[in-house]
C-alpha cells in the first residue's frame, strides 16, 4: 500500500500511545514512531509544547489533501484546512530502524514501513 492511499480519507482519531502516535483513518492506520511536527498557518508545533496535542487533534474530521513519503527525508500528510503533519526520516532524527508505518486496521492490504 502506498501512502497516497490515504488521500481523500477523513481523519477519525488521533491516538497517543506512550512514546508514539497513531492517526486512524477509515481503514488505514498511520503510526509515527517519532513525534511528528504539526504545521498550521500561524506556526509549527513540536511534541512537548503546550498546544501540541490540541493542534494535532484539531485536524480530526478533516480529509487528507496530499500525502507523501520521501525515503530518508520525511513523511508529510496535508489536510484540507492547510494544516499538515510532518515527520523527519533522516537517520539523525529517528531512534529506530524506521519512522513509522501505514497499515489497514482490519488487516487487509500490505504494511508500508517508512
Image (cartoon, rainbow, N blue to C red):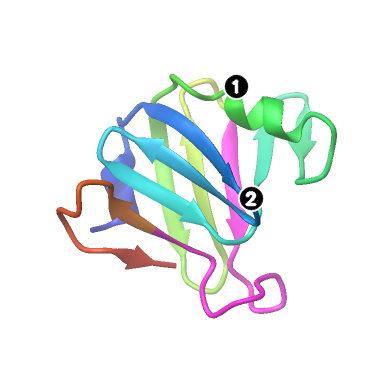
The answer to which of 54 and 9 lies nearer the viewer is: 54
Mark 2 or 1, nearer chain start: 2
Residue 45 vertical placement versus 98 (above, below): above
Question: What segment carries the magenta color?
Answer: 83-101
User: What residue is disc 2 on?
Assistant: 36
Task: Specify whether 105 is left or right of 10.
Answer: left
SS of the residue at dot 1? loop
Q: Position of residue 40 (x, y in %)?
A: 68, 29
Q: Residue at x 31, y 48 (%)?
A: 4
Q: Provide the residue designation for mark 1.
A: 58
* Quarter in which the N terminus is drawn: bottom left
Q: Residue furthest front?
A: 18
Q: Please rate how many residues cluster around mark 2, counting C-alpha atoms within 10 Å: few if below 14, some from 14 to 19, many from 20.
A: many
Real-space Cα distance between discs 2 and 1? 15 Å
Q: Is residue 65 found inside the magenta-colored segment of the image?
A: no
Provide the secondary structure element on which disc 2 rests: loop
Amino acid at each position: 500500500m502506498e501512502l497516497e492511499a490515504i488521500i481523500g480519507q477523513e481523519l477519525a482519531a488521533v491516538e497517543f500511545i506512550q512514546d508514539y502516535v497513531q492517526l486512524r483513518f477509515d481503514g488505514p492506520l498511520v503510526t509515527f514512531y517519532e513525534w511528528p511536527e504539526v504545521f498550521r498557518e500561524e506556526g509549527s508545533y513540536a511534541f512537548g509544547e503546550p498546544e501540541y496535542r490540541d493542534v494535532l487533534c484539531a485536524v480530526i474530521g478533516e480529509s487528507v489533501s496530499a500525502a507523501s513519503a520521501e525515503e530518508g527525508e520525511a513523511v508529510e500528510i496535508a489536510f484540507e484546512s492547510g494544516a499538515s503533519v510532518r515527520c523527519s526520516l533522516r537517520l539523525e532524527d529517528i531512534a529506530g530502524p524506521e519512522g513509522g508505518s501505514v497499515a489497514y486496521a482490519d488487516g487487509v492490504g500490505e504494511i508500508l514501513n517508512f
